Amino acid sequence: MTATAQILPFQFDTQEVRTLLIDDQPWFVAMDVASALLYTDAQAMTRKLDDDEVQNRQIVGFGPRGVALISESGLYSAILRSRKAEAKRFKKWVTAEVLPAIRQHGRYDIATATIGTDGLHILHELIGKKINVLPGATKRQARAKLWSLVHTRFNVPRAEMIPATELESACNFIAACALDGQWLPAPANDDTLDEADQVNLYALCSHMLRLHELYRQYHLREMFEHLQSPIGPSLYGHLSEGASLARRYQPRLTAARDRLGIR
């Protein structure tokens, strides 16, 4: 069975607890609950629960075997069986913050959710593509600088704590960051493009901007998420990065096109 509900991560101390709604009922990722309650074996924890308190779902990012989820009643059972001091605080956190948001709004309060590890992987991939054009010796410094800029821009100590509503903004921010002369080597003197090359690049930029516009206009990311396809975030990363570069160079390329009188 494939889950179409959106995974929303919450933060209990330093532990991410991923949650989702299935048939308007809250379910929790078992491995996250086990870690928060300091269980050494998540499977041992779920084996002690009733059959209707545990289910396995195919969710993007968890591999072909899917992920074990536990219901609200299963969560309470796991808490009661834990002898760790964290269990009491965890129960209070769930009952005071997570569940009231569900009951009040009929959904998770998206403002309290973060991008979590899934969003962090998307940003990692974007930054990796961003610095891929750099010489090997400068990649580590550039990567550290970009992460520092992200932390400052969104006022978070760790990127996974960026609000879930800001994931697209974070992707766009990374795409728009310029790799200045500090990282890029000086251009060679023999690689100047002629006007015909510039016009071709203008066409390439125009196509890239149009693709980015169509992706957003027809909500393709949401469509890929509904299909449980991992290609959505990755494709958006490529388009966002490409559109950012296209906007940067298009004015000069437009001038070359106009000089040649091409429309």
Image (spheres, helix red, strand yellow):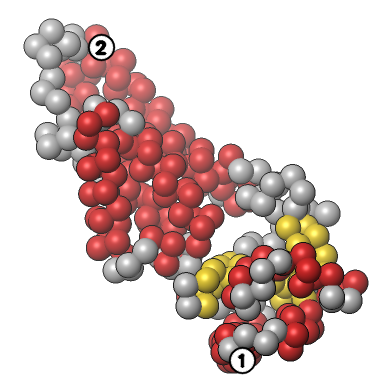
**Residue under the point 89% across and 76% down:** 50
- Residue type, numbered disc 2: Asp
Residue 85 lies, with reference to residue 66, above or below; the image says below
**Residue under the point 50% across and 62% down:** 116
Q: Position of residue 76 (x, y in %)?
A: 74, 85
Q: Quadrant of residue 39?
A: bottom right
Of the 4 image quadrants, the one containing the C terminus is top left
Of the 4 image quadrants, the one containing the N terminus is bottom right
Tag 1 or tag 2, which sits nearer the N-term? 1
Residue 259 lies, with reference to residue 120, above or below; the image says above
| Residue 251, visible in the rendered structure | no
Q: Nearer the viewer, residue 208 or 156?
A: 156
Q: Nearer the viewer, mark 2 or mark 1?
A: 1
Q: Quadrant of residue 220?
A: top right
**Residue under the point 12% across and 37% down:** 182
In the image, farthest residue toward the right? 51
Q: Give me the C-alpha separation between circle 2 and circle 1.
A: 66 Å
* Marker disc for residue 197: 2
Q: Count neighbours of disc 2 (C-alpha within 10 A) and say few if under 14, some if 14 to 19, many if 20 or more.
A: few
Q: Position of residue 6 (x, y in %)?
A: 64, 62
Q: Is residue 112 left or right of residue 181?
A: right
Label 1 sits on residue:
88
Q: Nearer the viewer, residue 163 or 72?
A: 72
- Residue type, numbered disc 1: Lys
Q: Position of residue 222 (x, y in %)?
A: 60, 52
Q: Is residue 111 left or right of residue 1?
A: left
Callout 1: SS? helix
Residue 196 lies, with reference to residue 227, above or below; the image says above
| Residue 189, visible in the rendered structure | yes
